[in-house]
Amino acid sequence: MYNKEKLEALKAERQKWEETEIAKVLTKKPERKEKFLSTSGYEVKRLYTPEDIEDLDYSRDLSFPGEYPFTRGVQPTMYRGKLWTMRQYAGFATAEESNKRYKYLLEQGQTGLSVAFDLPTQIGYDSDHPLAEGEVGKVGVAIDSLKDMEILFDGIPLDKVSTSMTINAPAAVLLAMYIAVAEKQGVSSDKLSGTIQNDILKEYIARGTYIFPIEPSMRLITNIFEYCAKYVPKWNTISISGYHIREAGSTAVQEVAFTLADGIAYVEAAIKAGLDVDEFAPRLSFFFNAHNDLLEEVAKFRAARRLWAKIMKERFNAKDPRSMMLRFHTQTGGSTLTAQQPDNNIVRVAIQTLAAVLGGTQSLHTNSRDEALALPTEDSVRIALRTQQIVAYESGVADTIDPLAGSYYVESLTNEIEKRAAEYIAKIDEMGGAPKAIERGYIQQEIQDSAYKYQQEVERGERIVVGMNKFQIKESAPKGLLKVDPAVGELQKQKLKALKAERDNIKVQESLEALRKAAEGDDNLMPYILTAVKQYATLGEICGVLREVFGEYQQSVIL
Amino acid sequence: MNRPIRVLVAKPGLDGHDRGAKVVARAMRDAGMEVIYTGLRQTPEQIAEAAIQEDVDCVAMSILSGAHNYLFPKVVQLLKEKGGEDILVIGGGVIPEEDIPGLKEAGIAEIFTPGTPTSVTIEFIKNNIKRN
Amino acid sequence: MDIRAGIAAGNKRAAARLITMIENGEPEAVEIIKENYDKIGTARIIGVTGPPGAGKSTVTDKLAKLLRKQGKKVAIIAVDPTSPFSGGAILGDRIRMSDLNTDEGVFIRSMGTRGALGGLSKSVNGAIKVMDILGCDYIFVETVGVGQSEIDIVKVADTVLMVMVPGLGDDIQAIKAGIMEIGDVFAVNKSDREGAEKTATEIELMLDLNGNTEYRPPVKNIIAKDNKGIEELWEAIEKHHEYMISSGNFNKRRQKAIETEILEIFKQNLLDKIERLEKKGEYLSDLTKKVFNKQIDPYTAAQELSSILSKEGGI
């Protein structure tokens, strides 16, 4: 992008500056640290100049918003056209309570719903399963059957809202329930919009709510791709998630690398299942974390967009530009929150919000200040949402597209992250792809090494976490935290008992047997699951049948 | 005492966030302890039984899902039933301050909340295990 | 806790504690074993070894489940390396055996190699005895087949199961040296993976070279995680056992193991005696200096140590 002669001259000038000015200052006063290292392992230089991006080619590497390789954003007008979707993840105990919270959030100006499920639901157990003891309704809403889902969305017109559901291993079942609720509201499935997370690979890597082994899990995922391409065309069939990989302790580079490696595995699986790449790829979406290192995060989002576009075009020969667009949701970093001086977290979340917006996110969840302590209170949730609104309406960063482009540092960092992530992906390719690398424990091991390194740096005081290992104060225990009523478990059990007494149990059995036969063969399972769901077969019963046919995943742990 | 301290690091319940448990396990190893790691989704029964068979000095559990008030005391109770009342039991994770007194009363020796340096946990174990 | 009463009652808690005492070299443990020695010798010992990542724990888990179905009592000793830097270890084999955890008829014990001289074989031998006294029918000893000490451990087994896996590349060469010879039964795990045939062929070739005409170790393809080939694998282990009995090799191998053990204990006792010498440090540094200054040679120094021992150590 720069004139060669001018670059040469610049180099000479810079060297002179370093040898005179800088050298002089350094002898008097050394810098704060000998080396400034990013968490991803590269050294951050004192100053970035055109020299650091001398190979940058504007049209090839950046191009225009909405155009390949989408470095500057996936839409032509970005936030000038429409702000990102402000989507707060919420799910509380029972369907009734969650329903109330959703209605509250919609009244407060939130534009999309985000459903958190409790752990038994995420792992395909009904609330009365022995392993569910103590867990029902704790981290989200308990859904045992279509009955609960009907209550959850009562009075919320499903053709008017977009709903994101954090559900993975049993995603097909919850999606089927959503379709069934919509049908009862008189909304046909082609009018539904929203997202299911449906990203099983990162469950094995980082989040832990897997059920089935890798192969049948991949089949369920491609079944969903295929079904939605036909019947639920506006649905985002997967949200390929780096969020949890980062939460588990990865670096920014690893977050990009492992997420895109997972993405590659899904695309390969779908192609292998006979789908055309341009038929399903436009519905793939991503989910990233936003941490405190503002500029590294912005570069991360830009690098991820460019790298994915290249992968889709060059590796998978996608033709439709929408197949090459990396659209993503962002959540601010839960692991960056401190239990100490929780109000400081509001500031962290604000920085992370900026990172996500400057990085061109399509939707955003901002964490509440008290999430390191417990589930957030209504006050905290409101502040988190206001943080987004302040960035959107007061900061001015949403008024022009990709405002940090052209920054020597940000462009150089974007290149660096892309390069390092591509190296990781090449290594994973060599192992036979993400599923194989996961089976070997390679990806998990890399993340754990980063997590341990980070922890040691914090404990040695090499990394400062304000309020936690520096600037501490004596604090009294925070009051007024939200608690889940332990009676939820009992309530769910009673509801299940009543349901099993009133539904047509013969039809339930028939639908489950049909599902079993289908699972043993290679039909698309979505229609069978939908039928079972409509007969009020429970989540646990449906997943139970699949468990019997598919078996369960065995963790591969290397420490 | 020159024998290594043996610790069972366990994830009771369904929550899959094991970053903390794994980091602590590594730190314990680097402090010279023998760490038996159980993996995810352990029932209280499995944890107590493993603790007995492995004859550990300490059971260290981590929960982030909010199920601690049920699962932690259950492990202590089962350990007692199996004759493991001299095993030190500690817990960590996202645990509200107001739950801590009740957990201590139920026999959990200490609760370590987010942000606790691993060295603090390790020091606590060294100073509080009940046999030499 | 009354260990003796507990052991007599078949209490797992007491047995577990006794194993700890053996690991920590507590003399009391030896006394308890001695008192119970008449109960020893009924359990069959199966060594499971192979390279890291071959799936040894999963194979052991499946075999144990098979035996549980037959109503047998099973014990598993899983050995993992101790970090040479910190002396600590992460023992993670139980992860793959979670559902055996609460089975009444199963006892699992994880051990670190701890790196002390002869300490590991003493600990493993001791643990085997405790589990034998406890009435276990089968005792699996699982170690990573990388170091000599781990190989020695597996040699106490009546049958050694070597678990291999496709795609190790050069590792198989490294493993061949020294440890392939001790395998009585071979399993190629994860045999749905590419290269399984090749691995099996390589093992067969190596067995051709060994040329034991009387008994040829079988090579079984298995997929342990899907429970595939496990019954066949168990049959192969049983066949080996039958061969060992009918050929008289069973007793020979056990006698050999006892001989090794006696010598091990003897050596260990000697070393312990040196450790317990009041002025051990002084003697050793004195002898070391003399050798360093070429006043005497190390052979003479060792002789001097022996005479010190016989004077003060009571040999």
Image (cartoon, coloured by chain):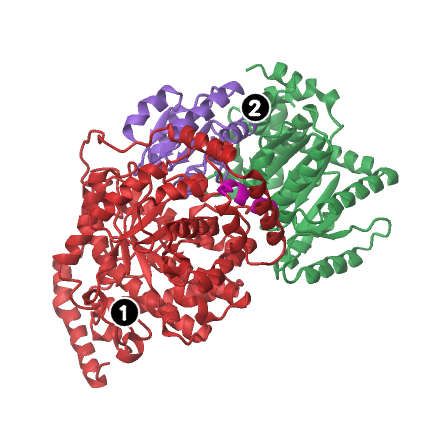
Chain colours: A red, B purple, C green
Q: Residue at x 62, y 20 (%)?
A: C11
Residue A11 is labelled as none
Q: Quadrant of residue A285?
A: bottom left
Q: Which residue is drawn at 27% across and 69% down?
A: A75
Q: Give the range drawn in magenta.
A: A536-548
Q: Residue at x 51, y 38 (%)?
A: A503
Q: What element carries label 1?
A: loop
Closer to us: mark 2 or mark 1?
1
Residue A488 in the image, given as x and y percentages of width and height: 38, 31
Residue A308 in the image, given as x and y percentages of width and height: 38, 68
In the rendered structure, which amino acid carries the disc numbered 2? Answer: Arg
Residue A476 in the image, given as x and y percentages of width and height: 20, 29
In the picture shown, does residue C52 fall above or below B106?
A: below
Q: Position of A15 compared to A534: left or right?
A: left
In the picture shown, does residue A331 fall above or below A279?
A: above
Chain of the residue that carries numbered disc 2 in the rendered image = C
Residue at mark 1: A75
Residue at mark 2: C17
